[in-house]
Image: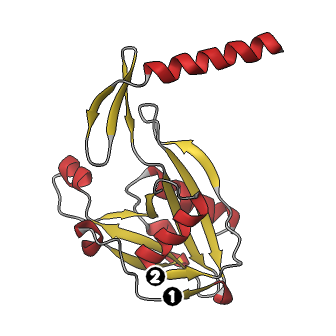
């Protein structure tokens, strides 16, 4: 066992040394190289689907996203889960609570226990990961205030929308994580 442990540490150290090469560094992402491979390094992300159980609706975001518009040459908004990057030094739970507040105005009760899944790699070409959280919220689990946003222009153009559980099958998802979260909701709560 000792030989295996030593070999494992050495392999990890070699990989870390090789990944030091930065091919590109922007404001939000980096492209790094390891050998002849390139991969994207971005902030890790929380993906949240609030299910207001008592009221019978879920919350999603309607956003304007440049990659979506570039790909499809449309000005339509992108329908997605509440999500956002984890800030340096921030815990996953703190990021979930912050993003909920910024994007939907939901302030969770301090005793509310989050159930988080992940980390899940975003793609094979990215070192960043997702953490998912399906939130079942009852009347006394939260209060709702005016969402402050994060101050960005994109956030000012986006909005959080309520969708009835009866409309879940009619939702056209624009990304795999939202599709995953809606499928999980339907399976966990036997929604047809």
Q: Is residue 125 left or right of residue 181?
A: left
Residue 99 can be seen in this image: yes
Element type at marker 2?
loop
Q: Which mark is residue 144?
A: 1
Dot 2 alpha-carbon crowd within 10 angstroms: few under 14, some 14 to 19, many 20 or more? some
Q: Residue at x 44, y 68 (%)?
A: 170
Residue 192 can be seen in this image: no
Q: Residue at x 56, y 53 (%)?
A: 131
Instruction: Quickly name the residue at label 2.
Output: 105
Dot 1 alpha-carbon crowd within 10 angstroms: few under 14, some 14 to 19, many 20 or more? few
Residue 2: percent from the left, percent from the top?
81, 14
How much space separates mark 1 and mark 2, taking CA atoms?
Answer: 5 Å
Residue 36: percent from the left, percent from the top?
36, 14
Q: Residue furthest right?
A: 1
Image: 187 above or below 161: above
The one of 120 and 91 positioned closer to us in this rendering: 91
The one of 135 and 192 positioned closer to us in this rendering: 135
């Amino acid at each position: 066992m000792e030989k295996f442990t030593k070999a494992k540490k050495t392999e990890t150290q070699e990989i870390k040394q090789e990944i030091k090469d930065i091919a590109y560094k922007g404001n939000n992402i980096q492209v790094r190289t390891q050998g002849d491979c390139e991969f994207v390094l971005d902030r890790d992300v929380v993906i949240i689907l609030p299910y207001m159980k008592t009221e019978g609706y879920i919350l999603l975001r309607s956003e304007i996203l440049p990659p979506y518009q570039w790909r499809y040459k449309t000005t339509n908004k992108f329908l997605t889960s509440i999500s956002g990057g984890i800030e340096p030094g921030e815990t996953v739970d703190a990021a979930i609570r912050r993003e909920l507040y910024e994007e939907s105005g939901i302030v969770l009760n301090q005793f509310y226990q989050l159930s988080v899944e992940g980390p899940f790699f975003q793609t094979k070409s990215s070192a960043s990961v997702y953490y998912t959280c399906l939130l079942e919220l009852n009347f006394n689990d939260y209060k709702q205030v005016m969402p402050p946003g994060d101050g960005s222009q994109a956030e000012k153009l986006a909005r959080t929308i309520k969708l009835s559980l009866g409309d879940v099958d009619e939702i056209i998802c624009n990304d795999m994580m939202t599709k995953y979260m809606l499928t999980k909701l339907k399976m966990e709560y036997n929604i047809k």
